[in-house]
Image (cartoon, rainbow, N blue to C red):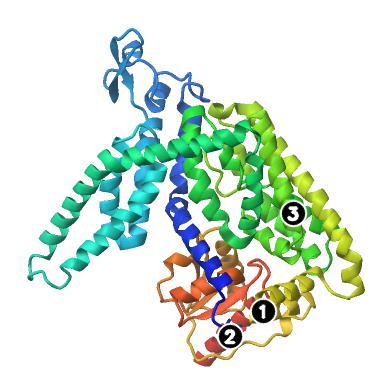
Amino acid sequence: MTTTSATPSGVNRARVGVQRFGTFLSGMIMPNIAAFIAWGFITMLFIAVGWLGQWHPVADLLGGFGNADAVGWQGAMTALAKAPDGTTFLQYVGLVGPMVTYLLPLLIANTGGRMVYGERGGVVASIATMGVIVGTDIPMFLGAMIMGPLAGLLTKWMDRIWDGKIRPGFEMLVNNFSAGILGMLLAIVGFFGFGPVMLGISAVLGTVVAWLVSIHLLPIVSIIVEPAKVLFLNNAINHGVFTPLGIEQATNVGKSILFLIEANPGPGLGLLLAFTFFGIGEAKASAPGAIIIHFFGGIHEIYFPYALSKPMTVLALIAGGATGVTTNMILGGGLAFPAAPGSIIAVTAAALSPAAGGIGNLLIVYLSVLLAATVTFLIAGVILRASRKRDLAAEADTFGAAIAQTEANKGKSSAAMDALRASTAGAASATAPVATDRRISRIVFACDAGMGSSAMGASVLRNKIKKAGVEGIEVTNRAIANLDGTEDLIVTQQQLTDRAKARNGDAIHVSVDNFMNAPQYDEVVEMVRRQSDGDA
């Protein structure tokens, strides 16, 4: 059950490196998704064209529109605005503008600084990013994602200069003044130098997206996005790249197609439907349940093993993804804020916003989901049907064939693949637990973001341990980047195990292919049960 592997090949090291970088980017966004959603709902309700936009004067106050003198609410938070004729008047500031201009970028910067150098790095990162924000006239998400970690890193390097050299009693004085002075200097640099540079970069990226749309080439992005998702780069792509660009676009025009390039649940739905109707064995049996988790729960990771079991089906995902993007591009569909997780429920809420176009936009988005699912289903169905007879004739499940192919590609076997092969043969319950002297009291499920799929797996194992009558075992989930060495047993998906080992090499590592239905869970339960019986 513990995973052992040879020295990673250059390809594996490159893959892990890309995953780690992508996870770092998404790690600045994911913890703050609730703030993005809050901003989205406030926008949906209180802007001038929002659902409650006619509810004066409260909507004017919260939405940040309207003339304060006109409605007579003089005590409201206001700012001077200039009319076309050159006269000035008081206008509400509201929540929408300040949140997207200040709150969201500062949250991202603080998170990035904390990831590099804890609370101290987060504080300096926030100060520095304020200079970037004020030095530009657009929401500085990209600037925050660069300045935040950079400020945290510079703070870390600064502290090393006089580490151990401060006289006793002066530590707090030096630490506070040094962080404050560094933050001030970085804020000034951000205002005069970094901000304008990021403004130019944002303009170039926006121009590239607009150019791809104008020449109808945006769908080709699916050629990169869909395979990258299956390699567990979904959070990095969506929240590390598309979300910052999409927020800027949505601020200007009310919605963005970029929120739907990765988050569209249509391709995954089509693939799982194809396995439901045309798959065999374990894949066919588990696909219907996976549909519920994927489509309504928004956990896209659930369909990745199915694509890996038949790599040719990635072509179906690419075609489906491109179809969804094309539909939204031609008809003007988009979301007002990020759909996280990528559930049809979250997509509906973000598409229904009046700023995005209301019911009309929602129908376009639904059409993009439907067409993406249909195209993926048809192509994946053809692929599965073409190999069905061969798999049955060889008395092999599609999952079993995928295991052999995966081992051939990697050049080595693994305990995870052996356990998965046993599960497809119906022998999962016969596997014996691995003997270990390590006392297990803390089990952690780890994935890229520490949410979604890992939370789902932790819930499954937690229930199994509870049914076995074992107490005193903590089962939680967290991001791989947040593993701190206190874990006794770490469960990860096979592609992410190397990264988890790098964070905590002393723990027992369990690789699984599917967090929902892994035979290794029974081994873990048996292990902790025996430990519990030994204490009795």
| Residue at 20% across, 52% down | 182
In percent of width and height, residue 328 lies at 66, 34
Which amino acid lies under the numbered mark 2 shown in the image of this protein? Met
Of the pair 509 and 322, the residue shown nearer to us:
322
Residue 26 as seen in the image, left or right of residue 90: right
The answer to whether residue 37 is seen in the rendering is no
Picture layout, residue 404 above or below residue 74: below
Picture layout, residue 223 above or below residue 100: below
Residue 182 as seen in the image, left or right of residue 255: left
Q: Local crowd at mark 1 within 10 Å, few (<14), some, or many (≥20)?
A: few
Instruction: Examine the image and state in which quarter residue 280 appears.
Output: bottom right
Q: Which residue is mark 3?
A: 315
Labels 2, 1: front one: 1
In percent of width and height, residue 397 lies at 82, 71
Nearer-N-terminus badge (3/2):
3
Which amino acid lies under the numbered mark 1 shown in the image of this protein? Gly
Residue 225 as seen in the image, left or right of residue 371: left
Cα separation, mark 3 vs mark 2, equals 41 Å
Nearer-N-terminus badge (2/1):
1
Nearer-N-terminus badge (3/1):
3
The answer to whether residue 338 is seen in the rendering is yes
Residue 527: numbered disc: 2
In percent of width and height, residue 396 lies at 84, 74
Which amino acid lies under the numbered mark 3 shown in the image of this protein? Leu
Q: Quadrant of the N terminus?
A: bottom right
SS for dot 1: loop
Cα separation, mark 3 vs mark 1, equals 24 Å
Q: Which residue is mark 1?
A: 411
Residue 120 as seen in the image, left or right of residue 383: left
Instruction: Examine the image and state in which quarter residue 381 appears.
Output: bottom right
| Residue at 51% across, 25% down | 50
SS for dot 2: helix
